[in-house]
Amino acid sequence: MANTFIDVSQAYEVLSDPEKRKIYDQFGLDYLMRGGPAPPPSGGAGGAGAGASPFDGGMPSGFSFGGMPGGGGTRTFRFSTGPGGGSGFQFSSADDIFRNFAKAGGGGMDHDDLFDILGGSGGSRSFRSSRGPSSFQQSHRGPTPEPTVVEKELPLTLEELKNGTTKKVTVKSKTFDASGKRTVQDVTLEASIKPGLRTGSKIKYRGVGDQEEGGRQDVHLIVTEKEHPNFKRQGDNLITTMEIPLKEALTGWERIVRTIDGKSIRISKPGPTPPGYEERFPGHGMTISKKPNERGDLIVHIKVRFPTSLTAQQKEVLKDLL
């Protein structure tokens, strides 16, 4: 493990600087480590060709290729000549290299560059330029997933939504004990319903559902409206429909309408009632959630019931009257 740590550190120091990478690509690791003989010249005078040593021409025995990325300070890559003509590079501290690697966020290098170059087993120093799939990438595990969200309907009556209420809902929660055995328990959620809350509203509870890899599930209660026998909700208004026969629609009518609070309102029209006629009563609708002291309107929709058949005599009478 320690050898692998050092290998990766040295690989990063080589690859993090373009000039160092160029020397490595041209002459290999052996040359860097021991200052070994350069490959035979392949032609072309002047410049550092494939056979020219980058250290020819009076290169000083200690030189710097510049700083590593990330602002972590200069990392010196030294070439030294030892007794007997032996020579080689001296790498910076492995701890220092990895500390700067972390600060630089990886130095802009792919994992292929840094880890796949450590080919062979045991972290041997066989640097490679290959960009094929690395064992590190294949075994790399993604971040822990976020817990999922469970949605459960919370049906409420129009009266409960108008006035506000408190509801208790029980959900099943699956967890695991210390031995890994799954247990199921009931969790009671208490929902405080504000007056005027609309259908589709969500009441959220964190970490009360089933246990998963990333934690326990969140539970969202979705407000829905139960069907009402007399009213339909339209925003903050309530609509009720009243049916009258054609005769009354023509001659006039009178009715008593019950509000959602149980109050009685007298409604009448002495003359003919046209199709689609409505009566509006402000302040008798739903509570307005953002203005709990105010309410919407009660709208009474009049539906005219036509006869299914007429006798010949009735038709003649209507023709004379109309």
Image (cartoon, rainbow, N blue to C red):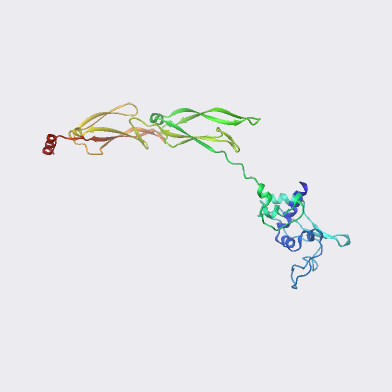
Locate residue 60: give its quadrant.
bottom right
From the image, which quarter does the C terminus lie in?
Answer: top left
Q: Which residue is drawn at the image coordinates 27% and 32% (left, top)?
A: 242
Above or below residue 17? Residue 46 is below
Q: State which quadrant residue 42 falls in.
A: bottom right
In the rendered image, the residue lying farthest to the bottom is: 45
- Residue found farthest to the right: 84
Q: Is residue 73 left or right of residue 195?
A: right
Q: Is residue 114 visible?
A: yes
| Position of residue 60 in the picture relative to residue 192 (left or right) | right
Horizontal and vertical percent for residue 62?
Answer: 80, 60
Residue 256 spot, x, y in % from top left: 26, 28
Q: Position of residue 276 (x, y in %)?
A: 26, 39
Q: Is residue 94 visible?
A: no
What is the total number of numbered labels drawn onto the structure image? 0
Q: Examine the rendered structure and indicate whether residue 290 appears above or below residue 100.
A: above
Nearer the observer, 321 or 66: 321
Residue at 70 percent across and 53 percent down: it is 116
In-image side of 193 versus 50 (left or right): left
User: Residue 63 in the image: x percent, y percent?
Assistant: 78, 61
